[in-house]
């Protein structure tokens, strides 16, 4: 796969070229979604802007802010870029610690060009999975130890039967597993190769078992922003793949999903949903990230169109057949929010309105003049249908400041006791949100 190396001068020239395309400035577009109609501006209605966050860490005693009736505490700290959290069937909690890996000066330039924050550029990837176990059932893990190391940018994790699965950036590994074990001592085997790396943070590969355990779904983000390296470099990418538990039988379940990181089953109707991180460089308000149900065989637009049949001017006229069949996503989540984490609330500890709804971790913008994301939002569901998103966990951006942030939320999951756990990779910790008694 070709690697994109962009200098600051080249990136500035690219933005200037994009912003000069006056012929693309057509009228705004109204798009009907599951619960609302949104108005999308024309491409390049505003300039494409680089606005990076500076992570300063959390001051002593300060936490993110949840709505009234909830309490936020630190669950664990001292982690190295905890991006994803997985709860095993026995209640053990596994954390994937990994980040974008630097590969010399050229890679560092690339990372800056495509929006890596200071924290993501400063440290090598830990490439491990850490086990957390709350033996006292007091909301704090008494056990914190490396479960599996020496990995290659691990992200998705899964326990299925007597196997533990890990999705590295370049493939899926399967290990023999017994519930309750504290360390992986057996060698695993690679059951599926995957295309490695990718634009910005598109190296993440997630895993989700089907409700009956007979299939595994694998998310693979695009290798570029909008196919600029050629579509021959996007084979098996921007998809949700479906495989058998032994790695065989691969097929594309859904396509045109630029970076479908979070995946989960809606509890009421067992419909697959994903949170998708959309494309850059079309202006402040394009393109909205989204939460959507995933229809088997459906195409969601990337790279030829966005948010339905709105043709991307950079791919104009190339695939009108695919533009025509593009499915409109269900819930817009804001442009450049980096909506990555996804977990449906399937416990009973939170108030009734939260049950069966979706929490989405928004890692935060870099390609927008003012910050967007840097929070966890909640999407209520009624009778299996999504409503409008609302803020749930905020306070990651420093007050009155357009540069500094305390941390960046990403992976979210529901603990066995009904608490919401939120991975803050930039701050190296996990937050715990509970309903106040």
Image (spheres, helix red, strand yellow):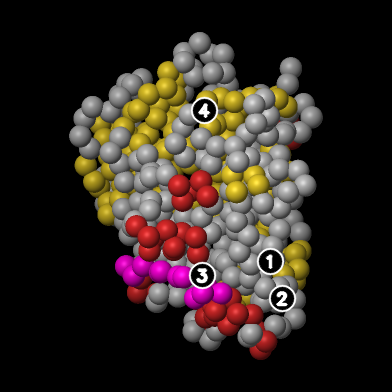
Report x, y in % for residue 165: 33, 39
Quick check: 286 left or right of 323? right
Judge from the rendering whether residue 99 lies leftward or rightward of residue 411; answer left or right: left
Position of the C terminus, as image quadrant, is top right
Q: CA distance from mark 1 to mark 3?
A: 20 Å
Kindly report the distance in space between the C-alpha atoms of the residues bearing marks 2 and 1: 8 Å
- Please identify the residue farthest to the top as the structure is shown: 136
At a point 55% along the width and 84% down the height, the residue shown is: 316
Dot placed on the residue nearer the N-terminal end, 4 or 2: 2
For marks 2 and 3 on the same chain, the one whose residue lies earlier in the sequence: 3
Q: Which mark is residue 77?
A: 4
- List the residue tagged with mark 2: 45
Q: Which callout, 4 or 1, points at the residue further toward the start of the chain? A: 4
The relative height of residue 380 versus residue 29 in the rendered view (above or below) is: above
Q: Tell me how far mark 4 sits from mark 1, CA to CA.
A: 34 Å
Mark 3 lies on residue: 8
Asked whether disc 2 touches disc 1, contact meaning CB atoms under 8 Å apart, the reply is yes
Residue 40 at x, y percent in the picture: 72, 70
Q: Mark on residue 284?
A: 1
Disc 1 or disc 3, which is closer to the eye? Answer: 3
> Looking at the picture, how far across and down is residue 318, in whole percent?
49, 84
């Amino acid at each position: 796969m070709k690697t994109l190396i962009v200098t600051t001068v080249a990136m500035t020239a690219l933005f200037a070229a994009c912003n000069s395309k006056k012929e693309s400035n057509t009228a705004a577009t109204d798009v009907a979604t599951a619960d609302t109609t949104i108005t999308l501006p024309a491409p390049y209605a505003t300039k494409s802007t680089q606005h990076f966050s500076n992570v300063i860490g959390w001051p002593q005693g300060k936490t993110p802010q949840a709505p009234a009736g909830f309490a936020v505490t630190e669950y664990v700290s001292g982690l190295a870029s905890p991006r994803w959290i997985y709860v095993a069937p026995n209640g053990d909690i596994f954390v994937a610690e990994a980040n974008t890996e630097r590969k010399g000066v050229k890679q560092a330039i690339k990372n800056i060009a495509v929006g890596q924050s200071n924290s993501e550029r400063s440290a090598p990837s830990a490439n491990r999975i850490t086990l957390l176990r709350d033996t006292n059932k007091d909301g704090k893990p008494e056990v914190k130890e490396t479960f599996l190391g020496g990995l290659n940018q691990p992200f998705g994790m899964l326990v299925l039967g007597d196997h533990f699965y890990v999705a590295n950036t370049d493939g899926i590994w399967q290990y023999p597993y017994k519930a309750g074990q504290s360390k992986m001592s057996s060698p695993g085997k690679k059951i599926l190769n995957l295309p490695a790396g990718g634009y910005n943070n598109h190296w993440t590969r997630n895993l989700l078992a089907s409700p009956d355990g007979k299939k595994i779904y694998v998310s693979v983000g695009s290798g570029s922003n909008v196919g600029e390296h050629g579509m021959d470099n996007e084979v098996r990418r921007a998809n949700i793949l479906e495989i058998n538990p032994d790695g065989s039988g691969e097929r594309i379940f859904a396509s045109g999903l630029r970076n479908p990181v979070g995946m989960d089953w809606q509890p009421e109707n067992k419909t697959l949903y994903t949170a998708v991180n959309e494309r850059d460089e079309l202006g402040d308000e394009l393109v909205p990230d989204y939460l959507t149900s995933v229809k088997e065989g459906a195409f969601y637009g990337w790279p030829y169109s966005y948010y339905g049949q709105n043709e991307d001017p950079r791919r104009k006229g190339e695939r009108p057949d695919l533009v025509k069949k593009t499915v409109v996503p269900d819930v817009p989540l804001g442009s450049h929010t980096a909506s990555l984490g996804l977990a449906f609330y399937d416990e009973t500890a939170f108030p009734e309105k939260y049950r069966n709804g979706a929490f989405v971790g928004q890692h935060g913008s870099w390609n927008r003049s003012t910050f967007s994301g840097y929070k966890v939002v909640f999407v209520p569901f009624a009778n299996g249908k999504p409503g409008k998103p609302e803020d749930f966990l905020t306070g990651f951006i420093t007050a009155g400041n357009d540069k500094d942030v305390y941390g960046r939320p990403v992976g979210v999951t529901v603990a066995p006791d009904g608490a919401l756990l939120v991975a803050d990779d930039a701050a190296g910790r996990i937050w715990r949100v509970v309903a106040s008694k």
